Image (cartoon, grey):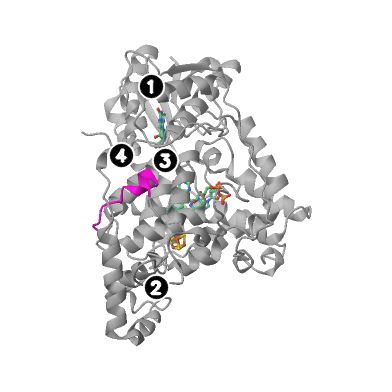
Amino acid sequence: QPVLVPILGDQLTRTLASLRGRTKGDTVILMAEMWDEATYVKHHKQKIVLIFSAMRHFAKELREDGWDVDYVELIDEDNAHSFTGEVARAIERHSPREVKVVEAGEWRLNQAIAEWPDKFDCDVEILPDDRYLCPIADFRSWAEDRDHLTMEHFYREMRKRTGLLMQDNGKPTGGEWNYDKQNRRPPKDDMDPPNRPLFEPDEITRECIALVEDKFADHFGSLDRFGWPVTRRQAEKAADAFFKERIEKFGPYQDAMVHGEDDLFHSMLSTSLNLGLLDPMELCERADQAYRDEKAPLNSVEGFIRQILGWREYIRGFYWYNMPHLQKANALNAQRSLPEFYWTGETDMRCLADCIRSTRDNAHAHHIQRLMVLGNFALLAGINPREVQDWYLVVYADAYEWVELPNVSAMILYADGGKLATKPYAASGNYINKMSDYCKECTYSPSKKTGEGACPFNPLYWYFMNRHRDRLESNHRIGRIYANWDRMGDDRQKEYLDSAEEFLATLKPSGPEYARYED
Ligand code: FAD
Ligand code: DLZ
Ligand code: SF4
C-alpha cells in the first residue's frame, strides 16, 4: 500500500514537505485540474493557463524522474472537480495506507482538508507549508499582544532571524533598516527599462491555451501576450534576467509609473514565487549576495528583500491571523458597486485606463498601480470590499486569497479598521501626477480641483476625508489635514462635495457575472 501525496496547483516545489524523504516506489502523487478551483472566481484566462501549464510541466518532470504521478485533466470524464472529491477517488484507485498533504494556501480549502481524517478510512497527515519563511504560529505569537501589527517591526525581526543584510555586530548592513527614502524617484524620460523575458508557449502551454479558450471563453483577460514562466528552469531564467538587468534601478523607480511600460524595473517574479517554482529564501540570498559582490546598490537590494522577507511573509501571517473575519470586514461601511470600467477599461481617467489595460493584457500590474491608482480609487469611491476582493482575485496571475485579501481588504480599503495600515492610502491627483506621466495627456487636469475637467481624484479625496472625519481626525498621521479642510469654508467645501457626487453619479455599476458564475 503506497502513500498518496496530493499536490495543489500552487505547490509545485520538488522539496515540498509531503515529498521530502519519500521513496518513489512507495508513493503515488495526485494532481488534478478541477472546475471548483478554476471557477470559484472567474480567474483571468492567463492565470488558468499558467496554473494548468505549470501543473502539467511539473507532473511531466516528476514522471521523467521516475515518480508515479496520477494526473487528472479537466476534461477527464469522471473528474469530481473538487479537491476532496478527487482525493476520495484516488483512494479508491490506489488504496493507500496514508494520505500526506501540505496545508493549502487558502482558508476555504484548509477547512475541507481538515475534514479528511474523519472522512477517509486511511491515515491522514496534514503538514505545515514550510516554503514560507515565517511559520504561521510564529506570526501569531508575534501579533498576539499588539494593537498595531506594524510591518516594519516584523521585518526587522525577520532580518535578525535570517541574518539577511545583517552585520556581524547585530546591526543592519549600512546602518539603516530601511532605505525607502531613496526609493521614491519619479519616472524620467531616459529610464530605458529592459523588457522581461517572455517565454514562447510550448506544446503543453498551447494545449492549455486552447482548453481555456474553449472552456473559459467568457472569463476576463487576453491570452495574446502569454509568456509567464511555467517551469522552474524558466522561472530561474526570469530571475537571472532581473538580477542582471533590472535590480540596479528596482529600488529608485519602485513607485514610478509610465504609460504603456508594463514591467519597468520590477522583478515580475510573483507568479513563480506563488506557484512554488522559485524559493523566497534563495531569491533573498541572491539579492544579498548581489550587494556584497557590488553588483547592486543597497537601496535596491534592501527594497527587494523587504518586499519578500517583509511584506510577503507579513501578509501571509496577517491572513491566517485574521481569517475568516477578514473576508467580511467593512470598517468604513463602503457599499458602492464596482464600476464596470474595472472590467472594460472604458474610462477617461488615463491612469486607471492604462492600469486596467495592463491588467487585461498581462494579468499583472505593478504594486504602485494596484495600490495608488486602482486601490486608491476603490477606497475614495467607497466600493464595497466584496466586489473589490473578487476583482483582484480574478485579474492577477499571482492572486491567491492568502495574498490578495490582506492587500485588498486591509491595505487598500482600510476595511480592517487600521490593524495593518496606520492610515488609509488615500491620495489626490497630485500624487499620481508626481509619480507618473499619466496626467500629461489625460482629459482631466490634476491641478484643477473641482468642476468640469478636474481630476476626479481631487474631489473624491475630500469627499472621502469628510465622510470619515469621525474615525480619521484623531489619527496622528492624517488628522492634521482637517485643518486645511476647515480653512476652505462652507462654499468651497460644498464645491468639492458636489463635484464628487456628480462624478460618482456617472459611474455605471458592473454586474456580478464578470467575477462569478451564477450559483
Ligand atoms: P516586485 O515589485 O518585483 O516585488 C518583489 C516581490 O515582493 C513580489 O514578487 C512579491 O512576491 C513580493 N511582494 C511585494 N509586495 C508585496 C505585498 N504587498 N504582498 C505580498 N507580496 C509582496 N501580490 C501577489 O503576489 N498576489 C496578489 O494577489 C497580490 N494582490 C495585491 C493586491 C493589492 C491591492 C496590492 C496593493 C498588492 C498586491 N500584491 C499581490 C502585491 C504586489 O503588488 C505584487 O506582489 C507585485 O506587484 C508583483 O510583481 P513583481 O513580482 O514584479 O513584484
Ligand atoms: C488557482 C487554481 C486554479 C485556477 N486551478 C487549479 C486546479 O485546477 N487544480 C489545483 O490543484 N489548483 C488550482 N488552483 C490553485 C488552488 O486554487 C490553490 O492551491 C488554492 O487557492 C490554495 O492557494
Ligand atoms: Fe489620473 Fe487624474 Fe492624472 Fe487623469 S489627471 S491621469 S485621472 S490622476
Say which of 289 and 92 sits in front: 289
Residue 32 appearing in the image: no
Percent coordinates x, y for residue 315 in the rendering: 45, 53
Residue 500, horizontal then vertical, whole percent? 30, 67
Residue 307 placement: quadrant: bottom right
Residue drawn at (44%, 58%) of the image: 373
- Was residue 337 drawn as part of the magenta stretch in this picture? yes
Identify the residue position indicated by label 4 in the image.
514
Residue 16: image location, x then y, percent: 53, 33
Please tell me the numbered disc located at residue 105: 3
Q: Earlier in the sequence, mark 3 or mark 4?
A: 3
> What stretch of residues is rendered in magenta?
334-346
Mark 1 or 3, nearer chain start: 3
**Res 14 label:** none
Query: In this rendering, which labeled residue sits more in front, label 3 or label 2?
Result: 2
The image position of residue 245, as x and y in percent, is 71, 46
Q: Which residue is mark 2?
A: 449
Distance between mark 4 and mark 2 Cα atoms: 33 Å
Q: Of callouts 4 and 2, which one flags the residue occurring earlier in the amino acid sequence? A: 2
Which residue position is annotated with label 1? 214
